[in-house]
Image (tube, rainbow, N blue to C red):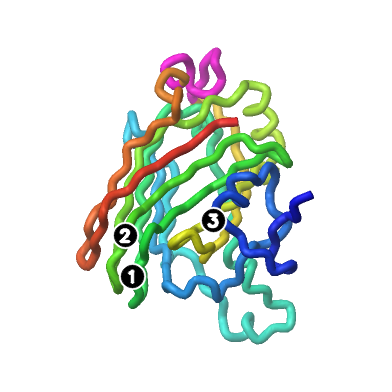
Amino acid sequence: MKETPSLQNNIMVNVDDVLGLTAPTKGFLCSLGANTYSIDFLSFVIRDYDTKRSIFEVSKDSVPSPSMDQIRSPSFNPDDYRTIKYNFSSDILRTPTISTTLTFSVGPKEVEDFRMIERHYFRDRLVKSYDFTFGFCIPNSTNTWEAVYAVPLLEPDLVAEMVANPFETTSDSFYFVNDELVMHNKAAYSYEDKAESKTSSAGGGGAKAAKRAKGMKYAAKMGAGSRSGGRGASSRAEAK
């Protein structure tokens, strides 16, 4: 039986390992020190593509850094700072198409074949998977990556369970450079059901969304910031 990759058993984690995961990892699969490229996420925005309504927005400045007293505390765990909790309206589970904008910087080393794989789960069930290739980033650059994609169609009963059980929907985000795992972040999600949420008989965006989601094709681009460069980006995804 193939051993499950982990930081503790020192098995090198590759792309195939991550794509083969069917449940959340119990811990982090690389150390914070694996990010030798000094990749730093500066801001992230999610919008309803059709209405342009902002669903979620966060920036590095809005997330407090640990104080020196916290760092010196025996109970300090740096891994707590790569786990985030999101509170969303349940609209996002039924929105047919969303757009995202991610701004990030890199350090003095070239970043070749920067790739993110994100696995989303409800409890121990894989419900969707995203696979993004950012491309090349020049040293000491700030980069903006934009994507527009269909939200995988979810069954109404699953949506109801996700809403009824806050933070039991989770994700693992894995970042690779030249097929080497350099970052691993985790997230947990809570969805609040509101009367104004978009609904349909299909549960996850309706027939129109299902048609758009077939094959899960994405439009994506890498934009140039004041100091950035890119060679394009591509994206793949699948719904389970």
N-terminal of the two: label 1 or label 2? 1
Q: Is residue 207 above or below residue 188?
A: above
In three-dimensional space, the C-alpha distance between marks 1 and 2, rounded to whole angstroms, equals 8 Å
Residue type at numbered disc 1: Glu
Label 1 neighbourhood size at 10 Å, few (<14), some (14-19), many (20+)?
Answer: some
Q: Mark 2 sits on what residue?
A: 136
Instruction: Name which residue lies at 52% across and 34% down.
Output: 238
Q: Do the CB atoms of the residues marked 3 and 1 lie less than 8 Å apart?
A: no
In three-dimensional space, the C-alpha distance between marks 3 and 1, rounded to whole angstroms, equals 19 Å
What stretch of residues is rendered in magenta? 198-209
Residue 235: percent from the left, percent from the top? 40, 42
Q: Do the CB atoms of the residues marked 1 and 2 lie less than 8 Å apart?
A: yes
Residue 193: percent from the left, percent from the top? 59, 31
Kindly state the secondary structure of the residue where label 3 is placed.
strand
Kindly tell me whether residue 53 is visible in this rendering: no
- Please check the rendered image and state whether residue 200 is part of the magenta-colored stretch, yes or no: yes
Q: Mark 3 sits on what residue?
A: 174
| Nearer to the camera, 155 or 28 | 28
- Please check the rendered image and state whether residue 237 is part of the magenta-colored stretch, yes or no: no
Q: Is residue 204 left or right of residue 221?
A: right
| Nearer to the camera, 73 or 232 | 232
N-terminal of the two: label 3 or label 1? 1
N-terminal of the two: label 2 or label 3? 2
Q: Main secondary structure of the magenta part?
A: loop
Q: Mark 1 sits on what residue?
A: 110
Instruction: Name which residue lies at 68% across and 64% down.
Output: 11
